[in-house]
Amino acid sequence: MSLDAVLVVAAALFAVGLYGALSQQVVVMVMMGLELMVNGVLLAAAGFWWFMAPAPSGQVLLLVVLAAMTVEMAMGFAVATLLHRRRQTDMTDMAEDLSR
Amino acid sequence: MVAAIVFWGLAVVAVAAGVAVFVVDSMARATYALAVSFIAVGALIILLQQSYLGVITILMMVMEMAVMAVYMVMFMGMNPALMPMDMTHGKKTAIGASTGVFVLLASGALLIPWPERRGVPPEDLTNALGLEIMGEKMLVMAVVGPVMVATIVAGVVLAAGRTRYDRLGDDLRRRPADDPQPGGIGR
């Protein structure tokens, strides 16, 4: 187990999540992709902390990443609810106009 | 040696379950796969001696996946475990972009000469993290707290079907309120 190995695994998780975030049409599935990407960031941060500078203050960064995951998920669910309520859909293609 | 075997086992499970999220043909299975991936990553974090954060990751993500399953049943309007589906777009672009990002990140991870470890971890990491949060890094948590509150408020505002403006009009002066189910004192 080394930093290189941890980072390669984190990169794989990030890449898989990126594929999901770009390719999926259902809002909830897009959120799953984003979660996988943040999951990779979390693992990379944990690896950096352990193998480079294991001071306690570094762990606080991981807590912030976890908080970011929570916020992303909560706002994603809220937007999915709003989209379903207003347009009776859960597909990103039906909400393309929101990106303009 | 044992740690290396456990690490690679968990790593394979984490990535394979992550891939399965977008390969399986039902959203329920995708949710379970994502939960498995998160549990494996939580275990990897525990393996990196950060027990507290690893356990938080596992607990939080398993609960999130449970909420996600409820959402899918709500929005898909069907039994998601029984409905095969393929709802994707721009697959080739997505595969190209994700492969490129992986090659870039992995080559960076393997080619960069990482510096030697500086310092040693404290004996009780969880205790040290608690002291840090309550001491020098309190500002971080003091900011995260209001962000969480703002998220709750924003989430409720976005998700609420009817707000006070629907009930009381744009000037909030309509009396009695326009409710789908009339009732209350004097109405």
Image: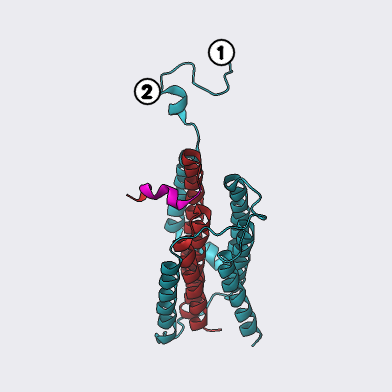
Between A94 and A13, which is closer to the camera in this rendering? Answer: A94
Residue under the image location 58 percent in, 63 percent down: B57
Image x and y of residue B34, in percent = 59, 63
* Highlighted range, magenta: A90-98
Between A20 and A6, which is closer to the camera in this rendering? Answer: A20
Apparent colour of chain B? cyan
| Image quadrant where residue B42 sits | bottom right
Question: Which numbered disc, 2 or 1, marks the residue that appears first in the sequence?
Answer: 2
Prevalent SS, magenta region? helix
Q: Which mark is residue B187?
A: 1
Amino acid under label 2?
Asp
**CA gap, disc 2 to disc 1?**
21 Å
Q: Residue A91 in magenta?
A: yes
Chain letter of the residue carrying label 2: B
Image x and y of residue A99, in percent = 35, 51
**Mark 1 neighbour class, 10 Å CA radius: few under 14, some 14 to 19, many 20 or more:** few
Q: Which residue is mark 2?
A: B171
Image x and y of residue B16, in percent = 59, 73
A25 relative position to B127: left or right: left
